[in-house]
Image (tube, rainbow, N blue to C red):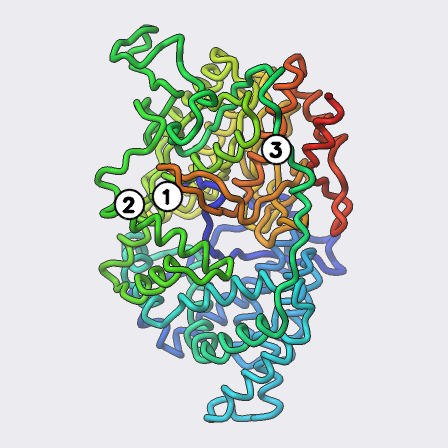
Amino acid sequence: MKRLLSLGCLTLSLLLHPDVFAQQKQVITSVNQLPVRTIPWEGKMIDKLQDPVYLQAMRDTLRQRMEADLAAFDIQDRSTLSAYYQGLLMIAFTEGNYDESSALIDQIVALTDKEEDKLLTGNFILSYLDALAEVPDAASEAFPAAFGQAYTRRLGALPIEAVREGIEAMRGNLQLSSRDLITAAVEGQIQPMLDNMGPEVPESIGLTVISMQFTLDYRLRFRDEMLRTYEQVLNAQPAAAKVDIWAARNTTLPDKGLKPVVVAIWDSGVDMEVFDPAQRWTNTQDPIDGVDNDGNGFVDDFYGIAYDKEAIRANSVLLQVEGQVRDLVRVQKLTKGSMDLQAAIESEEATALRQAISELDANSYSQFMEEVGFYGLYSHGTHVAGIAAEGNPAARVLAARLSWSHKTMPDVPTIEHAQRTAQMYRDVVAYFQKQGVRVVNMSWRYNAAAYEGALTANNVGGSPEERKALAEQLFEIEKTALQEAIASAPEILFVAGSGNENNDADFAGYIPAGFDLPNLITIGAVDSEGKKTSFTTEGKSVDFYANGYEVESFVPGGTRMNFSGTSMASPQVANLAAKLLALKPTLKPAEVIDLIRKGATPSEEDPAILLIHPAASISLVR
């Protein structure tokens, strides 16, 4: 429901496009203003994927609705428009409308502001069209080879260092893809949810069907040719040594002349034992001695404060493993394998992941996904905390655990749960104030759509319009409480990650990323060279950018792993803020922000964004 920033999934959104008559259209400035629509549903998705009559009817319905939207709305978000065109592109291509497909690719590229995305967009479809020019019969035995040659020509003509990471990621994803895996996902995870939804399902399910058909009928048909192309292009020339701008920017504080700074990691839980004892904040006011020392009806954790997924106080700042996974070591290994594949690292763990994926069926798929989801939650907060404390002997890490479900079927949202969550937000910020916290990192975000999706999945809330209204009501309860709680602690600097959906945080309505408060800043992610990552969420609410690609830090137990996401960028800035406060404890949040801004440098890729420069900001204090 609520989502951590380094965890993500591929979704399709219906979007709109302004044209020359935009002044006559309804201006859409928020995702909540988009219409809510459903499609009738009965039967099995796996059958529909093989039913040409159904697929054509679905394409007709979706195209008609999207074109009507295009005529009615002026949507103010590039990523939303791009995703909308991607839906139209799949429909046009699978229907054989190739001129329209080429035009849609041009429109998608025009809406893209990241170099890698611009260069990689549309190459599969354009290569297919190139092959058709040579071998007009796409069903012939000669066609796959023609496609492979065309695909190699197109990718081989691109500046390799500008697209290497993207191609490596595509290769890693394709290596895991198979018809059997899609079947397992549909039958083991998607179909049970569809069966639970009733006779009407979200319109996005129709786009999911079209997308899966595209994958099954086209991408998987040319899987071998695509993998050969990736290998050939990547091996054509050795990877150039990347210029790591952060090595010169980061700094380690000396262990003298510093004032201890309490840094709160408001996240999914932290294994405090991986940190040096000197960096662990400890609850001296209410020690964990089995006694309710402060009369609050609860025995506090020695290292912070914790809440379970029902927003009820818990007694451990680290998630408990028992009963959640069969083999934690195995799941950690598979998680590392996933990271290695994304980074084009051939390892024992990557091989183990491929093997595990190849063995999944409908019965095991859901359990596999839930175990991997649990490990993501289990490890996330510790990884974030390690980044926030790096190089700062004055940091005192305080853990504040939020909890989310890792189950594939989301819990049913209720007013009562929203009210408990709202009170949790108030209580946690009050706890921060009581313990003298100066910096809080918040590597999580969500919006009303999270609750709308959960209500839909559980077939709760009446009509789509009623569900949307209920979701917004639930979200508003929590949003108001969180915003007011942060505003009530002007002495604390809150640092939020922007999101990993390559969208606009303000348009999406994310909290806390979209808050406009003097003591909160929002952080986007760039890579080691300072270029925007393909996933980073942007928008006017994003204040600074920091390294969020393949960042190394602790996971529970003390192993170090590389994670990517704005989850990893946000604590880089929390780290800098804590170092500034360790050097000059009298700084107020506004002054800390000002020092970060004065030290930051414009990106060479996009001068409108500011890259933090810890050494420069710290030199201003010294």
- In what element is the residue under mark 3? helix
Q: Quadrant of the N terminus?
A: top left
Instruction: Using the rendered view, name the quadrant where residue 286 is placed.
Output: top left
Q: Amino acid at mark 1?
A: Leu
| Residue bearing mark 2 | 328
Q: Inspect the image, locate mark 3, and give the three-letter code of the amino acid beneath it.
A: Val
| Residue 26 in sight here | no
How many C-alpha atoms fall within 10 Å of the one at disc 1: few (<14), some, or many (≥20)? many
Mark 3 neighbour class, 10 Å CA radius: few under 14, some 14 to 19, many 20 or more: many
The residue tagged 1 is 455
Q: Say if 585 sits above or below 475 in the image.
A: above
The percent position of residue 583, horizontal first and vertical second, equals: 65, 18
- Where residue 608 appears, as percent x and y from the top left, is 76, 44
Read off the residue under disc 3. 573
What secondary structure is found at the residue carrying circle 1?
helix
The disc, 3 or 2, on the residue closer to the chain's N-terminal end is 2
